[in-house]
Image (tube, rainbow, N blue to C red):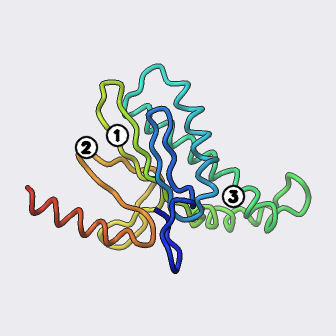
Amino acid sequence: MGSTDTDSTSELHKLYVEENLYVACAGRIELASEIISLFKQELAKLPSRIHGAIWTALNKAVHEHRMTHFQWDVIAPRHMFTPGEVFEKQHDKIIEEWQNYDLGLDMLVGTFHHSGLALLYLVGQVYDAQGQIAPGLVHSYAYPGFATIGTGGQMPIFGLTSATNTWG
């Protein structure tokens, strides 16, 4: 469900289900369809749906999407004074901006290994135990596992963690 200040609704189109691909989105959900399209293209190239190949395909899709948006959201308006040219003295600033660039989109991607094993990936920034951003934008969760996204993600994590501790 998508939430507003007064209501919860399914009309926000935060869920994508097709061809053994299940995606839930939070944040800038308008970008999700772009990544999903790229991911489907990469999946179609795979000879076999195994974890490593699926993880690589998702990473390629996310990275390609991020590079394209960074080029047009950051480099072109801030650093490119003539088409295709950036001053050499700007390179360090561009690298710093790239490292801090966040699309503001989180996705939970579920799919299946060719053997039928469920696979779960979180696309977005994840923080480690020290509160630092963990490297990478595509994170795999071992089966059986769980992950949550969105501004309200801490409540489901608490509930899922409590249930896991209670049930064994």
Q: Quadrant of residue 143?
A: top left
Residues 86 and 25: in front is 25
Q: CA distance from mark 3 to mark 2?
A: 33 Å
Q: Amino acid at mark 3?
A: Phe
Q: Which residue is mark 3?
A: 70
Residues 68 and 14: in front is 14
Which label's residue is closer to the chain start, 3 or 1? 3
Residues 4 and 78: in front is 4
Q: In percent of the image, x 55 and y 26: which residue is there?
A: 44
| C-beta proximity under 8 Å, tags 1 and 2 | yes
Q: CA distance from mark 3 to mark 1?
A: 29 Å
Q: Secondary structure at mark 1?
A: strand
Q: Which residue is mark 2?
A: 143
Question: Relative to 122, is 95 above or below?
Answer: below
Q: CA distance from mark 1 to mark 2?
A: 7 Å
Q: Quadrant of residue 92?
A: bottom right
Which residue sits furthest right? Answer: 82
Quick check: 4 left or right of 130?
right
Quick check: 65 left or right of 155?
right
Q: Residue 137's spot in the image, x, y percent?
A: 48, 54
Q: Residues within 10 Å of mark 2 (few under 14, many from 20)?
A: few
Q: Residue 30's spot in the image, x, y percent?
A: 64, 57
Q: In percent of the image, x 38 and y 66: which residue is there?
A: 127
Can you tell which mark lies on residue 119?
Answer: 1
Q: Residue 135's spot in the image, x, y percent?
A: 43, 57
